Amino acid sequence: MKKELIHTPEGVRDIYGLECAKKLTVQNQIHKTIRSFGYQDIQTPAFEFLDVFGEEIGTTPTKDLFRFFDNDGNTLCLRSDFTPSMARCTAKYFMDEKLPIRYTYMGSAFSNTNMLQGKWKEATQMGAELMGDGSVEADGEVLSMCIEALVNTGLTEFQVSVGQVDFFRGLCEEFAFEEAQSEAIRQYIKNRNFLALEEYMSGEGISRSVIDTFLKIEDLFGTKDILEQAKALVNNTVSLKAIDRLESLYSVLEAYDVEDYISFDFSMLSSYHYYTGIIFKVFTHGIGDVIVKGGRYDNLLGKFGKDRAAIGFVIVIDDLMQALSRQKIEIKTPKNNFMVIYDKTRYKEALRETKKLRSKGFYVQMIPYNNQFSLVDYEAYATRTMHSKLIFLTQ
Amino acid sequence: MSEERYLTFALGKGRLAEKTLKKKKKIGITCEEIHDKSSRKLIFVNEELKMKFFLAKGPDVPTYVEYGAADIGVVGKDTLLEESRRVYEVLDLGFGKCRMCVCGPESAKELLQHHELIRVSSKYPNIAKDYFYNKKHQTVDIIKLNGSVELGPIVELSDVIVDIVETGSTLRENGLEVLEEICPLSARMIVNQVSMQMQSERIKKLISALKAELEKAN
């Protein structure tokens, strides 16, 4: 065996055995939940034209995309996330559909980052998109579906932080900041660096009272009460409307009975300009990164031809698996597997037995008996290969 | 639910750690074990407060915090700038004050006035790159060194260096001086983005206690 051939390149890996079974189980659970909300499956290509994932649309910097050329000289790239593909599909096939469209997808997403050791270059993402419904009920449905999907995997301790990008936009308009100023302030708030924010704003000659208003955003984090505090802080219709929307969202979430998972967080902002309403992230123990990202992006579809309301989220399955495993949450993999060990002379009998079991829905494997191995060996082998029951048809 | 979990601190080895522990002591957070120089333990626990502490090499602190191996870290601003990790920088602890500077012999001053290509040696290639490319728009050739960076101009490996300057005595003894200041530095407290959400109450309490202590000290 050539040694160099058995390695995978840096950033990708094999998933096999019990780990693979667990991952598939979790994927199926989430898929089942999303399907129960009436979302339809969709598959899009693993690579597309670079422009679909370009600077304005994609969430990954172009330098971190896996890029290559086709024979005609077009630049292609492996998808770094699914949302641009979903938006493109909707624009292409459902241009004239006046009623909402619901999609769910699953597959690998790729990013060519070498900086982050411990982050995979290929990760399984599963998500859902609801297009053509801009109502608060749509916001509530997507959030609740996400929460329900996570709960069904066995995850109990997690927190969904919800922000509203219009709140910040309204504030910037209220104080008539220049584009560059808003952008700098957005970055500081997003990174929760209120230290540097204060320094920057005083440096820009912004008045003390305005600076204090922005510094208070840091504390706008918590349960429903925060919304009242946020209201007291602003004096413009855009921000007030954003808060109103969160209030109505909360009552939808109460109706779904998932409000306990929710925290409002007004520091949560995104660098992506296509987010237009709520944005949310899911945090849990055992992993230093968010496991779910989502939000409303009513402007994205316009980039493919036609404006349309849209909201969605993505669960990074590999990160969720890490969180489940670190939190020692048991994942029940299907284990009704049989192993039929037969002597050559009894092959036909063994096959009959196997077929009968298979027709009853059991998973059955057949292996010829070899007297070099003892019962203990076979039992160990059954455990290794996740078979719960041995059937011996030997002499 | 969050109260039962340990809050883990990663502290940059050396003076920063000592000063951090001193400040923490003032707000009632102690960890006696860590002061025991003979101990070979890597991680220290305060059971009462449900806190764990460990010492790590400075540049590794943001890495521990980014991946959530530590909830909170204390590290120099220089390391944060150089490593640019995804962590929240929440507090300027005020100690460990110094400056990031471009230094060299007086004769090198002239080289910084034009856009000509110069050689820069530094322990901080990213900071150097950002400063020359994005702020000064000067093309430079950066050489990464791991220590005694002052040697660079002396043995003519490079024209200037980018390094931390505290008092400037090492520079003067070697015939170098500060040519340009890039930015002021000090110790910062950083927090993992998930911890900030999941343990927000405990962490916020800690931050405001430290803030109050810092204001008193000033």
Image (cartoon, coloured by chain):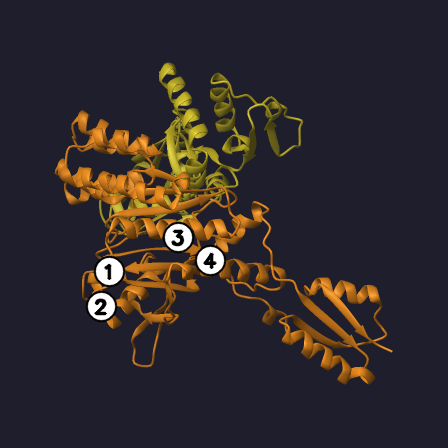
Sequence-earlier tag: 3 or 1: 1
Q: In the rendered image, which quarter is residue A307 located in?
A: bottom left
Q: CA distance from mark 4 to mark 1?
A: 23 Å
Residue B133 tag number: none
Judging by the rendered image, the residue that carries numbered circle 4 is A30
Q: CA distance from mark 2 to mark 4?
A: 27 Å
Query: Same chain for marks 3 and 1?
Result: yes
**Are the two marked residues, 2 and 3, in contact with CB atoms closer than 8 angstroms?**
no
Identify the chain of the residue marked 1, using the numbered disc in the image: A
Q: Would you say the residues marked 2 and 1 are in contact, meaning their CB atoms lie under 8 Å apart?
A: yes
Q: Which chain is orange?
A: A
Same chain under badges 2 and 3? The reply is yes
- Residue A132 is marked as 1
Q: Give the residue at x 32% y 61%.
A: A83
Q: Left of A108 or right of it: where is A327?
A: right
- Sort mark 2 into few (<14), some (14-19) or many (20+) by Cα contacts within 10 Å: few
Which residue in the protein does label 2 denote? A97
Q: Which chain contains the residue that carries disc 3?
A: A
C-alpha separation, residue under disc 2 versus residue under disc 3: 24 Å
Q: Which residue is mark 3?
A: A145
Q: Chain of mark 4?
A: A
**Under tag 2, what secondary structure?**
loop
Q: CA distance from mark 3 to mark 1?
A: 17 Å
Q: Quadrant of the C terminus of chain B?
A: top left
- What subunit carries mark 2? A
Mark before the other along the chain sequence, 4 or 1: 4
Q: Amino acid at mark 1?
A: Gly
Q: Amino acid at mark 3?
A: Met
Labels 2 and 4 share a subunit: yes
Task: Give the camera-side residue of B176 and A44.
Answer: A44
Q: Amino acid at mark 2?
A: Glu
**Left or right: where B51 falls relative to A57:** right
